[in-house]
Amino acid sequence: MGNAVLLAIAGPSGVGKGTIVRRLLERDPSLWYSVSATTRPPRDDEVDGRDYIFLSRDDFERLRAEAGFLESFDVYGDLKGTPRAPVEEHLAAGDDVLLEVDVQ
């Protein structure tokens, strides 16, 4: 993993994690932002792969059983998590990685 940095911005819903993440990405465009996966349906303005990776519950559960998430949890009846493979790939390539993580 070399000298790559993994930076996690964590907190409960509504505390401003997204604002901090946007500002960090504006200041340092070289950061790679890890897009979370969710089983909830996309909102009208959300784009799959940009805002979230939208998965069926079956696909999410399969990935979770295969240790495909760094962390995952149930939030308001939907599942949400951080896909493991892309984070590990970017760290191995020497990219600094930024995570936005909800705390329950």
Image (cartoon, rainbow, N blue to C red):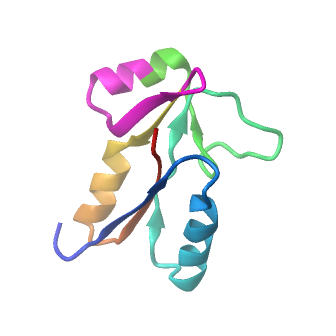
Give the residue at the far bottom of this rendering: 27
Magenta segment boundaries in residue numbering? 61-78
Decide if residue 37 is on the left or right side of residue 95: right
Is 73 in the magenta?
Answer: yes
Please, which residue is most extreme toward the left here? Answer: 2
Q: Quadrant of residue 61?
A: top left
Residue 53 drawn at (x, y percent): 56, 40
Q: Is residue 41 magenta?
A: no
Q: Quadrant of residue 72?
A: top left
Compared with 45, 21 (above or below) is below
* Closer to us: 68 or 104: 104
- Numbered-mark total: 0
In the image, residue 52 lies at what x, y percent? Answer: 59, 44
User: Is residue 85 left or right of 81 when viewed as pictured?
Assistant: left
Q: Position of residue 15 (x, y in %)?
A: 60, 57
Find the residue positioned furthest to the right.
44
Name the residue: 55% across, 67% down: 21
What is the quadrant of the N terminus in the image?
A: bottom left
Q: Which residue lies at the image location 50% right of the left edge and 82% below the top edge?
A: 28
Residue at the spot 51% in from the left edge and 38% down from the top edge: 37
Residue displayed at 72% across by 35% down: 42
Q: Is residue 87 above or below residue 64?
A: below
Q: Is residue 66 left or right of residue 104?
A: left
Q: Position of residue 69 (x, y in %)?
A: 34, 37
